Image (cartoon, helix red, strand yellow):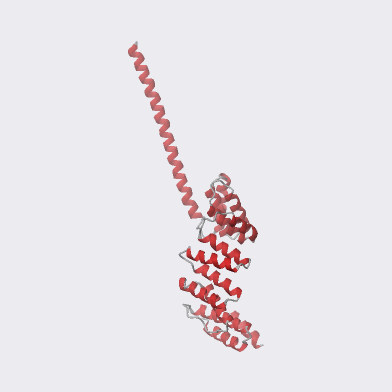
């Protein structure tokens, strides 16, 4: 009888162990699938943030945010996609929802400030940046701080923030160009010229910096094109900018000559320069 009881106990134990093992196996498989889904979601998020049409990404992230409204990655993806799609008001609202989540970071708050600037809400953007701890030192944070200081004509503060931002990036050409444009608007043409030259040295393909450099030189009545890499079309466009700068300074005959040179230089018909020249000679 005792022998039978032992057998029954062993059988019951084996059955229970089998059930536990089966349950444990199912949980392991379930967890594995969850891990795969997390990896797949992360990869898909990255893909959607780089698709050619940002509105497709917006549609995708709107759907997944509806399914998981507390998921910070999905909310972040939606906000980034809306900004990429130039839907700035919606993007700012999406960033507001993102930073309200417990898992939001200071980088998210910087992105919110950027979106607010793009949507024209400069005051709230400034408050957002001010609320971020000063220990959070990133290129984008200081670039935005510089832009806001510029908008308020706080030149010393702007220069300080631009200088810090330049030191925090390996690709400083765009911020050097912004800094130079700030100097240009202040009438500090020499310093603007220096900064535009630095931007071009960092990125010879940055046409905006070349165009701004021509404006800085033209403001000083220096109507010679700078020594910088440029193709024939770029050269014609820069001659056109230089011509308009000369005309603005009152050097009309010089401007006409530069317009003719721009028209002759352009590999195709240069409508804007031709129209400007025709208006001057009418």
| Quadrant placement of the C terminus | bottom right
Q: Which residue shows up at 59% across the image and 61% down it?
A: 86
Above-or-below relation of 169 to 102: below
Q: Residue furthest left?
A: 3
Q: Which residue shows up at 53% across the image and 77% down it?
A: 193
Q: Quadrant of residue 246?
A: bottom right
Task: In this rendered view, identify the residue nearer to me: 62 or 129.
Answer: 129
Q: Which residue shows up at 38% across the image and 26% down it?
A: 17
Q: Tell me where residue 271 appears, x and y as whole percent.
A: 59, 80
Q: Quadrant of residue 10?
A: top left
Q: Quadrant of residue 1?
A: top left
Residue 54 appears in view: yes
Q: Residue furthest front?
A: 156
Q: Tell me where residue 39 appears, x and y as whole percent.
A: 45, 47
Above-or-below relation of 56 to 28: below
Report the number of numbered marks: 0
**Does 20 sit left or right of 160 as displayed?**
left
Task: In this rendered view, identify the residue nearer to me: 115 or 69.
Answer: 115
Q: Residue furthest right?
A: 282
Residue 60 appears in view: no
**Does 93 sit left or right of 107 as displayed?**
right
Q: Tell me where residue 169 appears, x and y as whole percent.
A: 47, 63
Q: Tell me where residue 129 appears, x and y as whole percent.
A: 58, 57
Q: Residue furthest top?
A: 1
């Amino acid at each position: 009888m005792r022998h039978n009881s032992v057998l029954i106990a062993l059988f019951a134990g084996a059955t229970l162990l089998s059930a536990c093992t089966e349950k444990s196996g199912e949980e392991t498989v379930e967890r594995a699938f969850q891990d795969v889904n997390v990896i797949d979601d992360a990869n898909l998020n990255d893909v959607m943030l780089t698709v050619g049409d940002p509105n497709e990404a917006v549609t995708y992230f709107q759907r997944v945010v509806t399914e998981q409204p507390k998921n910070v990655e999905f909310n972040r993806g939606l906000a980034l996609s809306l900004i990429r799609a130039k839907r700035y008001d919606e993007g700012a609202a999406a960033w507001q929802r993102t930073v309200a989540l417990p898992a939001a970071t200071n980088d998210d708050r910087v992105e919110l400030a950027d979106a607010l600037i793009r949507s024209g809400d400069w005051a709230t953007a400034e408050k957002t940046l001010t609320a971020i701890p000063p220990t959070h030192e990133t290129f984008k944070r200081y670039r935005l701080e510089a832009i806001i200081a510029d908008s308020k004509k706080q030149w010393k503060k702007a220069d300080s923030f631009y200088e810090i931002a330049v030191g925090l990036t390996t690709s400083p050409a765009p911020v050097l160009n912004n800094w130079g444009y700030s100097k240009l608007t202040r009438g500090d043409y020499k310093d603007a010229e220096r900064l535009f030259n630095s931007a071009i040295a960092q990125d010879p393909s940055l046409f905006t910096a070349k165009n701004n450099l021509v404006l800085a030189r033209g403001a000083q009545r220096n109507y010679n094109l700078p020594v910088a890499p440029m193709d024939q079309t770029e050269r014609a466009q820069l001659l056109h900018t230089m011509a308009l700068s000369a005309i603005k300074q009152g050097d009309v005959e010089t401007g006409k000559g530069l317009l003719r040179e721009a028209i002759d230089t352009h590999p195709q018909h240069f409508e804007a320069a031709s129209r400007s020249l025709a208006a001057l000679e009418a």
